[in-house]
Image: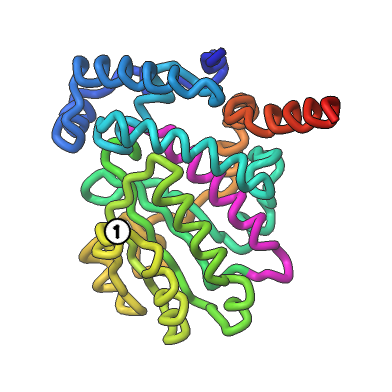
Amino acid sequence: RLGKRPSSLPNFIMDRMSSDLKLAAQRELGETLQVKRNAVEQLRKRLAEEPELQCPLDEEFLVKFLRGRKYRVEEAFENIRKYFRVRMDHADIFDNLLPSRIMFDTIFHQKKLVTILKKPDSLGRRILLVKFGAWDPQVCPLNEYFRAGIVVLECGLLNQMAQIAGVVGVADLDGLKMSHLLYYTPSEIKKIIKLIQECYPLRIKGIYVVNNPALFELLFTVAKLFLKPKLLKRVRFIGRDYEKLHELIPRDRLPEEYGGTLEPFDYEDYERSLRSQENYFVDIARYGYRERHSQNESSDSERRDR
């Protein structure tokens, strides 16, 4: 039986939307109350046809995926399937994925590796900052870096404006070394791109690559193999010319290290914010494909029949 999501999950989408947000949703996604109501009903019917998948059926959860695919119901359905499938296929990332179980001190306080900045850009899009070059494999395994990024992504997608206006990413390669290539392998690059492109209802409106050394060309040659053409066109190479970045993101929305005037980021407050969503992660982990259990039952049955 398909379950409903427990009430402890935060009710972000059903909160009263401002008139500006409603207009943005209609302009960006063609969203109206009727469109939303019809699409949710159709999506629930499609999910009912997938009995091995236990999925939340409440409007908050489903609308997040519908918005991510501009209310194309079949695409949202496939997105949900991939979202839960990847959680099963990559247990090394998703098992015990809780804000309380990630390396806060190393990833956030010390290295500041992944952040959603406080202010959106001029178009209302959330700004995701990821420092690939600053990652140190000696103090933080790559898998833990991925886990922290997924926690940030999950929490960010609870924000209505992120669902509607989308996000832009700033990929900082400062500090990238040859030794990183031992870890940023083609299989790992493919995995993270698949997660972002196919498994999450993420509307990526731009990727701005800064402080990229010549070495990055090797990584990007691999990444291009997996990026969809639409997203590939949204990649901009900034290098260290931050004036170019300011043409895309206003200076008052950027930290000082990128020539901006934004006040220093409060990582203590950010940690509290992420940890406050602990119950969300506990609850969503209860859902997913029951294939493992079914396969075990089949194996037991086969052994008994021998």
Q: Is 137 part of what is drawn in magenta?
A: yes
Which residue extends farthest front?
306
Residue 18, x across and y down, in percent: 24, 24
* Above-or-below relation of 133 to 108: below
The quarter of the displayed image where residue 237 is located: bottom left
**What is the magenta range?**
136-160
The quarter of the displayed image where residue 259 is located: bottom left
Say what amino acid the circle numbered 1 marks: Leu
Closer-to-camera residue (50/172)? 50
Point 40% across, 63% down: residue: 226
Give the quadrant of the C terminus: top right
Point 37% across, 57% down: residue: 169
Residue 65, x across and y down, in percent: 37, 32
* Above-or-below relation of 151 to 264: above
Give the quadrant of the N terminus: top right
Point 57% across, 17% down: residue: 8
Closer-to-camera residue (40/160)? 40
Q: Main secondary structure of the magenta part?
A: helix
Residue picked out by circle 1: 231
The quarter of the displayed image where residue 283 is located: top right
